[in-house]
Image (cartoon, grey):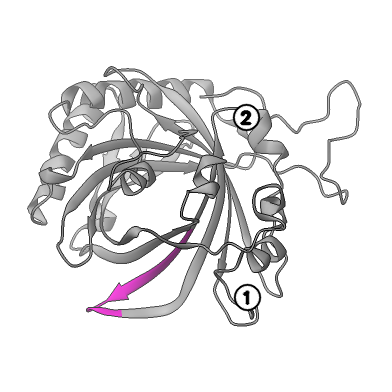
Amino acid sequence: MTGENQTTAVDGAAPRQYADGHPLDEIHYIEAKIILHGGRFTCVQNFFDFAKIVRKVAKETGVDFNQDEVEGMRPQIREVLFMDTKDFKLYNNAFILRRRINYEDGFPVGDPEIVFKFRHPDLETATLLDVRPSINGQYRIKFKEEVLPLKDRMGGIRSLYSHNVEFKFHPTNMSEDPTAASTLVRVFPALAPVLAGTKEHVQLVNRTAVEEVLQQLGTLDFGKGVLAASNVSVWRTRGDQHQLVGEFSYQMRMERRADVSAKAIQRSNEFFCALQHAAQDWVSLGTTKTGAVYRLKGAPPQSHE
């Protein structure tokens, strides 16, 4: 996990800014993720089987794991749709565009949510990319350090930096054809270098709608006030219910990255690495959930993950 916050003024210099003078976004989240074999999840009990491993490793590494607040909670269901050009121009340039909608009792609830993100292994590159949309309405910026296992062996750590914006999908946000490159460039100016001047349209990636089943597991306490809600999920294709991948994750939020206790970060890292070894029969190295969808039908695109 990274050290000092990248947007803090140095030696009295003014903080750096985007083109319109807005201060650069700062990391406010650390999200640790371990990708799991999708075939491990065939019933709800499998979520709690994995929770037993989490509880055991937490105890061994001196991390409190409180499950009281999630007792009796049922899995949440969401539909996730990834959109891209036929030749994956967005993903090949480190962009991800997806639509999510929650389901309750088998029916969609609320407005769909648009998530636009730029994900890159270089912190400076991720920071300088302005993801703010041009819409009439509210949006939320979420800049995360994503902590992942190494691609080729258990027990390590690597980081990706995910610069996200989220907003509710309304006709007033994208009143023109929402799949047209011209609309996307207007709404997401960051896409201009990729799509400007083209007449392309985005479509459902690999014609695949993803169903996410997510179970909250409880809160991990790494000490010094650093708490992280954890969950485990499985992604499967709608229709044939093919299990794509599972994922265990936990997320901590902070006002300033530099203020987070080094001891708490160390304890999180120790827990994260130990869990990989303890759950090695579950772990799938070298991919992400998004990557699994893009590679579903072969011909893998270029990846910045």
Q: How many neighbours does mark 2 have within 10 angstroms: few (below 14), some (14-19), or many (20 or more)? A: some
Task: Please state the horizontal and vertical placement of residue 31, each as a whole percent of the image.
Answer: 44, 39
Name the residue tied to disc 2: 123
Looking at the image, which residue is at 47% across and 41% down?
A: 252
Specify whether 222 is left or right of 297. right
Q: Quadrant of residue 216?
A: bottom left
Q: How many marks?
A: 2
Task: Please state the horizontal and vertical placement of residue 287, each as a whole percent of the image.
Answer: 33, 34
Quick check: is 89 in the magenta stretch? Answer: no
Looking at the image, which residue is at 46% across and 73% down?
A: 112
User: Can you say whether 276 is above or below 74 in the image?
Assistant: above
Residue stretch in magenta: 98-107
Name the residue tied to disc 1: 174
Task: Please state the horizontal and vertical placement of residue 173, each as a whole percent of the image.
Answer: 64, 75
The mark that comes first in sequence, 1 or 2, is: 2
Q: Amino acid at mark 1?
A: Met
Residue at the far front in the pictured view: 199
Q: Quadrant of residue 285?
A: top left
Specify whether 110 is left or right of 25. left
Element carrying mark 1: loop
In the picture, the disc for residue 286 is none
Q: How many neighbours does mark 1 have within 10 angstroms: few (below 14), some (14-19), or many (20 or more)? A: some
Q: Quadrant of the C terminus?
A: top left
Q: Foreground residue, 4 or 180? A: 180
Element carrying mark 2: helix
Specify whether 26 is left or right of 20. left
Quick check: is 105 in the magenta stretch? Answer: yes
User: Can you say whether 80 is above or below 216 in the image?
Assistant: below
Task: Please state the horizontal and vertical placement of residue 269, each as a whole percent of the image.
Answer: 39, 23
Q: Foreground residue, 102 or 28? A: 102
Q: Amino acid at mark 2?
A: Leu
